[in-house]
Amino acid sequence: MDALEVIKNWVKKDSEVLDLGCGKGEILKILSEELNTISLGIEIDQENITLCIQSGLNVIQQNIDEGLSNFGDKSFDMVIMSQTIQVLKEPKKALLEVTRIGKECIVTIPNFGYWSTRVNLLVSGKMPVTGSLPNAWHDTPNIHLCTIKDFELLCIECGINIIEKRFFDNSGIENSLTRLLPNLLGSTAMYKISK
Amino acid sequence: MSNSLEAIEVNTITLDGKLELECGQDIENIDLVYETYGTLNSDASNAILICHALSGNHHAAGIYQNEERPGWWDALIGPEKAINTNKFFVVCPNNIGGCHGSTGPSSINKQTGKSYGPDFPIITVADWVRCQSMLSDSLGIKVWHAVIGGSLGGMQALEWSCLFPKRIKKAGIIAAAPKLSAQNIAFNEVARQAIVNDPDFISGRYLDVGKSPKQGLKLARMIGHITYLSEEAMRNKFGRELKEGKLKFGFDAEFEVESYLRYQGDVFSESFDANTYLLMTKILDYFDPADKFEGKLDKAFKEIEAQLFVVSFSTDWRFSPARSKEIVNALIKAKKDVSYMEIDSPHGHDSFLFANKEYVNGLSSFLEN
């Protein structure tokens, strides 16, 4: 299974979904069409916002780093934050906020503990540049990278429950190896969490 | 070549029935002057209502014969523009209380044979919307594809979605606010004081004696105009440029910005009615849809069924982005369909009149999705 298939399994039919950093709205569009969700996206890029509007999605221009206090406690059935937490100024605060707003949340992170990232650093002695982390250290939006172990420790520290977790390899597919040694063989990790 | 519409038709309609106003009075035989652009389709499903702002009128788009200046929203309304007249049938009325042909303070009161002047009742945004719904009936438009407006026009679009949830599919609420701040009301009050203290105001009955409080109206417009522009726009447009290149050590208009404001004020005072201006500022001051709902905006929005698109502009300090976000957040709380964009634009409150690329793309996508 790929990440999108897992998301479709985790999101309930007819539920209310908030996607923080929804990009062009690809995930929300699929969820709206296939699961009849009531969807809202948060996005900062105006071209992406226009594309979302063209797709008929509701989308709000908002910078997540400036806070999410305009969303009420448990006001959405599911809050999705896909490949976003590592670009935020305050990931811990964001994690607490998404678990406040969503009854459940899906958070996807790139795993900095992935074997090729580790090898890359070990061999070259430079900040890793890989398929899932393609930018040089000085111009990457990914300012708060972490490993699977780090993320799970943060969840414990914040009192957040990890309900389910999945790990995907470099081609975005789940397999027996990513399940066996996720922090080494998982390129991205996806969590269903709640608080 | 301009891509503005030509051969604009100006229509006047006398509405059937009477309009019961919020103030308790009612008006009959209302004349409304309006323009239309584009063609209404066979099932009347492509109609868009444009609501004008404080000093606006029915001439939203196109160029009249023998005139140079197009309508006030020509940058956005026309063939293949943000509000595409090749697809949509666009209607823009001059609201009641106006001074461009619709029934207002300068119209003749049939009971007295004189102009209404100060006796014209105080109108509200909700009154306007009800009056516009009477126009919709007359035009055979049961449901508007969209109702759109900027500033006070955006407030009408918002009121439409609350008052007639079944008659509007989309609302474009641009550079608006859910109610005026004390600062907004203060500016309006200064404008009103400028008018009523002009010796030619004559308790509002100036038309009876062939006069007009032009000085007061000019001042009111100058004050208003400052609030429509941003500091950046003024700096870029005028800086500290001197009209004659050097200081003259006197009190005449020496800086470019001074002569610009005086000129704008003069032009406006020649063409606008002072009682209408007073009325328009009062309509703004009174607007507060949350008032009937214990101040809770999300409750005021409970009945909304339309999709809403809220737009603000970065340098607008009259109705700043924070004011638009109040509307957006209440709509989110009320679980309504809403999208929001904050456009980077240097033009202050007036930004809504300019065809900024992101703004045009966002609005046209919203109307056509």
Image (cartoon, coloured by chain):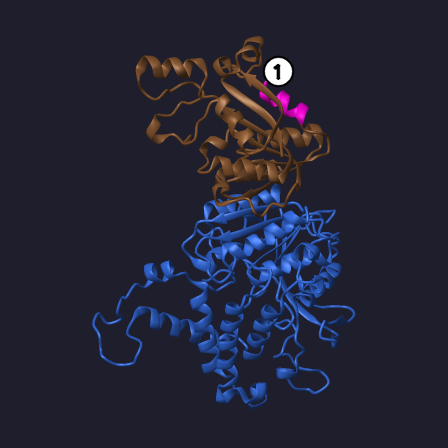
Chain colours: A brown, B blue
Q: How many marks?
A: 1
Left/right of residue A136 with respect to residue B214 in the rendered view: left
Residue on which the image places disc 1: A1
Q: Quadrant of the C terminus of chain B?
A: top right
Front residue of A110/B53: it is A110
In the rendered structure, which segment of residues is drawn in magenta? A1-10
Instruction: Check the residue under mark 1 and report the chain it is in.
Output: A
Up-down: is B175 above or below B253? above
Up-down: is B90 above or below B106? above
Up-down: is A49 above or below B130? above
Q: Main secondary structure of the magenta part?
A: helix
Q: Position of residue B51 (x, y in %)?
A: 61, 60
- Which quadrant would residue A74 be assigned to in this image? top right
Front residue of B264/B346: it is B346
Magenta stretch encompasses residue A4: yes
Q: Position of residue A169 (x, y in %)?
A: 52, 14
Front residue of B326/A77: it is A77
- In this rendering, does residue A116 appear at all? yes
Left/right of residue A174 with respect to residue B238 in the rendered view: right
Q: Residue furthest right?
A: B17
Magenta stretch encompasses residue B241: no
Q: Amino acid at mark 1?
A: Met
Up-down: is B336 above or below A47? below
Q: Position of residue B127 (x, y in %)?
A: 69, 68
Local secondary structure at mark 1? loop
Q: Position of residue B177 (x, y in %)?
A: 57, 59
Q: Residue furthest left?
A: B246
Residue under the image location 69 percent in, 57 percent down: B300
Q: Residues within 10 Å of mark 1 (few under 14, many from 20)?
A: few
- In this rendering, does residue B76 appear at all? no
